[in-house]
Each structure stands twice: as C-alpha cells, then as structure tokens.
C-alpha cells in the first residue's frame, strides 16, 4: 500500500472535495452541499483517511452507538489509487474499531464490484442471511 492511514475527522474541506469529486459523488460536492460534507465528516463517530504524501486518497467514516450498531456511511478511494489494497485497509481499520458492536450496516450501489469488495470484508447481503428473519427499511430524501 502506498498510503498512510490516519484517524480523525480534522480534514480540510478542499481535500474532501477533491476526493469526493474524483470518485463522482456529486451529491456531496455540489456548491450548496459543500458545508454539509464538512459537517457530516466532522460529526462522524469514526473517520479513517488514507494519504499519499499530502493528498487525501481514501476515506471511510462510520456512525455508531458503540454497542449495538455501526453504520458505515462512506468508503471511497481515489480512482488513481484503487486496486492497491487501500480500501481493504480502510474497512479493516473501521471494523477493528467496532469489532465488539453487534451489527455493522452499510448501503451501496448494486454493482458486482461493490458486492465482491464488501463480501471479502465480511459483509453479507441482507437477502443471503437466513439464520435471522430481517428486513431493512430506509427513508431517502428525493427518492420515491
């Protein structure tokens, strides 16, 4: 891995914007949402970032009560640094921090690459868990 991991949410908004723009997450980078990105990262329970020299190249952030639930909100790696193990290191750091928490949850796009990545990290699709009857419900602003 050619990046150094750091914990903490004290990350310059300009660095966050560069990373989120590079991966195409426009919901966070539109002019009217930029303050929300800074606030979301600052208010996260746990943030791990990956740096190549002084450039932010990856980030994972989670929200948790530190007992029953850990919600992984964002995990992203700059396209120029993908497939180098950085995403794996980020998610591992987050899961180690919350290893004692009963449920770890995340939502992601329905794409094969994401499915393979998260299954490798120990996550399972809710449809594939038969031992416990579960449903997942969400409310998302701007969706039907």
Image: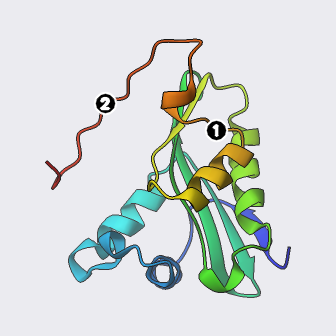
**Which secondary structure lies at badge 1?**
loop
Q: Residues within 10 Å of mark 2 (few under 14, many from 20)?
A: few
On the rendered image, what quadrant is the N terminus found in?
bottom right
Residue labelled with disc 1: 123
What mark, if any, has residue 57 been given in the picture? none
Q: Is residue 84 left or right of residue 105?
A: right
Relative to 85, say whether 99 is above or below.
above
Circles 1 and 2 in contact, beta carbons < 8 Å: no
In the rendered image, residue 141, in percent from the top left (x then y), is placed at 18, 51
Relative to 138, say whether 50 is above or below.
below
In the rendered image, residue 89, in percent from the top left (x then y), is placed at 78, 59
In the rendered image, residue 118, in percent from the top left (x then y), is placed at 64, 48
- How many numbered marks does the figure carry? 2
Q: Residues within 10 Å of mark 1 (few under 14, many from 20)?
A: some
Residue at image position (75%, 58%) is: 88
User: Which image quadrant for residue 47?
Assistant: bottom right
The colour scheme used to paint the residues is rainbow
Residue labelled with disc 2: 137
User: Which image quadrant for residue 95?
Assistant: top right
The one nearer the camera, 94 or 118, is 118
User: Which image quadrant for residue 128?
Assistant: top right
The one nearer the camera, 13 or 106, is 106
Residue that protrudes farthest toward the top in the picture: 132
Residue at image position (49%, 50%) is: 44
The one nearer the camera, 6 or 106, is 106
């Amino acid at each position: 891995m050619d990046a150094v991991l750091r914990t903490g949410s004290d990350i310059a908004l300009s660095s966050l914007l560069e990373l989120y723009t590079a991966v195409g997450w426009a919901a966070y980078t539109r002019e009217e949402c930029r303050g929300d990105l800074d606030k979301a990262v600052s208010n996260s329970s746990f943030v791990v970032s990956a740096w190549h020299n002084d450039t932010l190249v990856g980030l994972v952030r989670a929200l948790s009560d530190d007992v029953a639930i850990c919600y992984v909100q964002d995990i992203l790696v700059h396209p120029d640094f993908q497939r180098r193990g950085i995403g794996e290191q980020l998610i591992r750091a987050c899961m180690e921090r919350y290893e004692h928490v009963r449920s770890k949850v995340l939502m992601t796009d329905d794409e094969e690459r994401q499915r393979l990545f998260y299954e490798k990290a120990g996550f399972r699709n809710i449809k594939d868990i038969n031992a416990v009857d579960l449903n997942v419900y969400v409310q998302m602003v701007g969706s039907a």
